[in-house]
Image (tube, grey):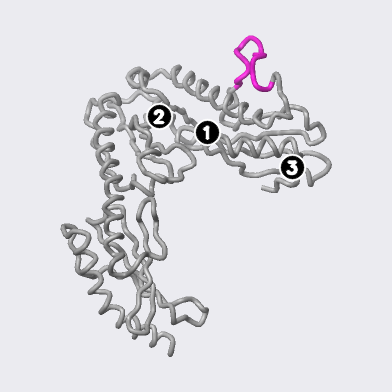
Amino acid sequence: MAIDTVPPLVAAQIKYLLSHCPFSVKVEQMWSGCKNPSLLDRFTLVIPYCLDYIKWDVIYNAMYPLAAPDIIFGPEDESFQPYYDGTEKSCKNSLADWNSRDPARLLSLIIELRNAYMAYQRKRIGEVDDDRLKFEISTMLPREGIEMYMSSGTDKSEEVKFAVPLLDMDLNKLVAGSMWSHPQKIYLQIVFPVGKKYSTAPPTRLKLISSPELKALFSIEEFRLPPWLDGMCTAEYLPILEEMLGSQIKDAVASIETRRKFIMALAPLFGRPIEADPVFCRRATFLASSAVFNFLVHFSLPLQFPKQKAAIILQSSQHFNPQGVPVKSPNLTEYPWSPRWDPSEMADRLFDFLAEESLNFKKYCNQLVQQ
């Protein structure tokens, strides 16, 4: 984003929005709407909503920087009029008393509009003539933080999506030292087809989705959802899912300490690591030697460690390819291993294996350089 060509008052509001917004809003593109094309006074905001994104255009006027911006919503939301209640425009909103010199004003406006958009979608879905959907909504009402969205179009049937936050726990506090900038969340996406009269209810589509950063701790892709039994409703399904998910999250946190103990067990044999992941303990690099041959040993530890063994790559400190890149070995995974060994035995067995493997790696490096 070319912030230096944005009018100063607008730039200050964009900067404050991006650094203080409670959800990860992004500026997708910027352009000029005035006679001076170097002044960028319009941009598209990408706003997370219901495990997807909505895009709104924010239109300032560089010639009148004290004026409030216009907001243009997406073409599928033509009926979304947040400051019009059907009879008259509301005077109590963030645009009514706009102060362009307050850098927090754009943030307040976007949060206000997003909350209004949530209410708009709830109202739309509440008007759908579908008994099953009405029942599901009634069972989920006690839960906080649920977002919903109804999609429709000429090329697809109507469907209602729910984003249900799971686990009443602060995931950010589970991992000491984590630098996550936003609250980490896990959601269940539930999709109900609506708008047609079915002889039998179509299957409910389920998908588990998490904050991207959470993948450093827990793999959502490897989690198997419990089956949705015939006749089951959301209120019955969620406690079963949360119990399974909570148990596996606790196991994932405990595995950090298991990986940490393994890395610590390597230190008496290889020396202190020259580089390591101190938070999730997924990586560690040691400097090793065999006679006069010096090389690095890179350990990459999977989330399922020690059930899944570490991947090991050797990197020469003395041999380089024609492009000047240090020579590396392929991934080493065929070595003595048992998840039942204690960390010290794992380290001892690996040290013996690498003492022999380093001779093969040195030979491989010499042959590669001589070619």
Disc 1 residue type (three-letter): Pro
Instruction: Specify whether 241 is left or right of 328.
Output: left
Q: Which mark, residue 22?
A: 1
Q: Dot 3: what SS?
A: loop
Local SS, label 1 = loop
- Mark 3 or mark 1: which comes first in sequence? 3
Magenta stretch, overall SS: loop
- Marks 2 and 3: CB-CB under 8 Å? no
Q: Nearer the viewer, mark 2 or mark 3?
A: 3
Q: Residues within 10 Å of mark 1 (few under 14, many from 20)?
A: few
| Mark 3, other Cα within 10 Å: few <14 / some 14–19 / many ≥20 | many
Left or right relative to 88: residue 330 = left
Element type where label 2 sits in the image: strand
Q: Which residue is mark 3?
A: 6
Proximity of marks 1 and 2: CB atoms separated by less than 8 Å: no
| Part of the protein shown in magenta | 81-95
The quarter of the picture where residue 367 lies is: bottom left
Q: Amino acid at mark 3?
A: Val
Q: Position of residue 8 (x, y in %)?
A: 75, 39
Q: How many residues crowd mark 2 within 10 Å: few (<14), some (14–19), many (20+)?
A: many
Residue type marked 2? Phe
- Magenta-colored stretch includes residue 196: no
From this view, report whether residue 48 is shown above or below residue 92: below
Q: 342 or 16, which is in the foreground? A: 342
**x, y percentage for residue 13?**
67, 35
Mark sitting on residue 162? 2
Question: Sequence order check: which comes first, mark 2 or mark 3?
Answer: 3
Q: Which mark is residue 272?
A: none
Q: Quadrant of the C terminus?
A: bottom left
